[in-house]
Image (cartoon, grey):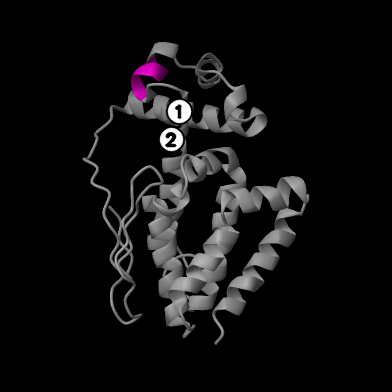
Amino acid sequence: MSQDVNGLESVSSTAPGGESAPRGSAQRLELPVLEVGVVRERADAARNRLRALAAAEHLFSARGVAGVTMDEIAAEAGVGKGTLYRRFGDKGGLAVALLDERERELQELMLNGKPPLGPGAAPAERLTAFVRAYLDLVAAQLDLILMSETSSPGARLRTGAHAFWHRHCHYLLAEAGAADPDLRARLLLAALSAEQVGYWLLTEKREPASLAGSLSAAAIALTVG
């Protein structure tokens, strides 16, 4: 499991994430670790998994999760329906696996990627890079993230992935010298929730690039004072 210089470790939206009290910026910010055993896939199984995830992502994006069947995903991926069910259980399991995969890809870039998203840039630069990257993720996986965030009251705040995003923002805001970085991190993440982003993009018809610019400016403002 990857670990950042500030103590972050990659986790998923499907794992509960209990948070301990935030610490000062000079200390490592430790995150609950998602205990997942190492699974060694055969090459053909790995290829089938990636094809299934890519097919599901394409179809979910085009028609929404509710408008897609497992038969259609199997046909799009070029794999047997039985293979799909054995690997993922049902469409819900496939949706969860897709969201986990995309969240972990972003987390890996934050932990070990090039600056400004990865380590090595100024805190404000890293924060705005995160805002843009996470907004891209939410826009691309809007249905899946919305389901994970609204499955029960307060679900968004209980996932391991949310704890990861919060600790990352908290750390960068503290490093930038912002007052009350915990509250400011939560304000920023509230603006990046799937429900809020979906409202801006789908109801108000805001342009993604313009929204990214406005949210990046808001993130910069949160680093001041």
Q: Which of 78 and 15 is in front in this view?
A: 15
Q: What element carries label 1?
A: helix
Extent of the magenta region: 83-87
Would residue 34 appear left or right of 219 to someone viewing this image?
left
**Residue at the location (39% across, 50% down)?**
159
Q: Categorize mark 1 by other alpha carbons within 10 Å: few (<14), some (14-19), many (20+).
A: few
Answer whether residue 120 is visible to the viewer in this image. Answer: no
Among all residues in the image, which is located at the extreme right? 205
Residue in the foreground of this view, choosing between 9 and 92: 92
Give the quarter of the image for residue 206.
bottom right
How far from the left and from the top, in percent, is residue 76?
56, 20
Whether label 2 touches label 1, CB < 8 Å: yes
Check disc 1 and give the amino acid type.
Answer: Gly
Q: Name the residue under label 1.
A: 92
In the drawing, what numbered circle is on residue 96? 2
- Expressed as whole percent of the image width and height from the top left, the position of residue 142 reads 59, 43
Tell me how far mark 2 sits from mark 1, CA to CA. 6 Å
Tell me: 24 left or right of 183.
Answer: left
Residue 198 appears in the rendering: yes
* Quarter the C terminus occupies: bottom right
Q: Which of 161 and 115 is in front in this view?
A: 161
Three-letter code, disc 2 = Val
